[in-house]
Image: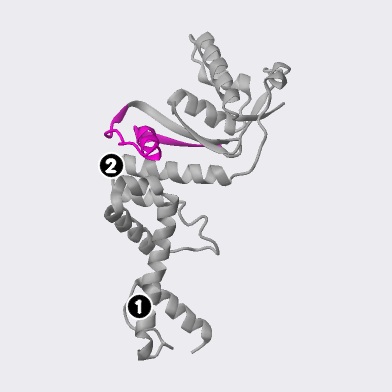
Amino acid sequence: MSLLAIQRGLRDHILAGGGDRPAGVAPSGEAGLAVYRRAYRAQLVACLRDTFEHTWSWLGDDGFDAAALSHIAARPPGGWTLDAYSEDFSQTLAGLYPDDPEVAELAWLDWSLRRAFDGPDADPITTEALARVDWESAALTLSPTLTIGAVATNSAAIWGALAEGQAPPAVERLPAPAAIRVWRQGLSPQYRTIDAFEQLALAMALDGCGFARLCEQLAGPDDAERVIARMGGLLGAWLHDGLICGVRA
């Protein structure tokens, strides 16, 4: 048997969490195999706990560890670093807690804020620079750390309370579709709950839609002035939050 086959057998044994002793391992090695099996899962659970600290607080030790072990069994690491291992943990939680959407939303927020902190740098544009923009032909360049996720609950308020060490509020369903935007301002990751209008506007801007065209697309036949006014307010908020990093023709 080749060394590669022995290595793969050992890998499969550890991933499966037990079973028949893999080829190439003597009976006296059973105790060592058990150590590897436990250490493998323990390290991955610790990795998930570190990344999803507030989700862990919400679920408690037993609930979080059970979810983490389910994730580990279904999705073993595939890269040379664990940085990206946690990316789809919120999807695992969505499957495990279909009636509690705040769980997956908290995990998405934990993950997105962590990635925003590690994201690429980009200097926000100044108010003076915007004053010279021809808005008929302008398109916005937004922060490379910006990400947007749809939410159905008050998960942002829950996350904020957990981050402050306070008792979190009870779960509430939002009265209308909403989203959370996550980005980094300076060295500080930020998050904010936004409504469906801002979510769509940001999605269109990220897709490269010009500002004038964006306003046209969002406005109905009878509310162009309202939409333009609303977009003006959003433009000011995005500028204040450091979301706008450039304007291109």
Query: Element type at marker 2?
Result: loop
Amino acid marked by disc 2: Asp
The quadrant holding residue 174 is top left
Please tell me the numbered disc located at residue 100.
2
Q: How is the image coloured?
A: one colour
Q: How many numbered markers are drawn?
A: 2
Residue 244, above or below 17: above
Q: Is residue 199 left or right of residue 160?
A: right
Query: Element type at marker 1?
Result: helix
Amino acid marked by disc 1: Ala
Residue named by callout 1:
34
Residue 222, above or below 66: above
Residue 228, above or below 203: above
Q: Position of residue 29 (x, y in %)?
A: 38, 86
In this rendering, does residue 197 appear at all?
Answer: yes
| Label 1, label 2: how far apart the Cα atoms are | 35 Å
The range drawn in magenta is 146-174
In this rendering, does residue 75 appear at all?
Answer: no
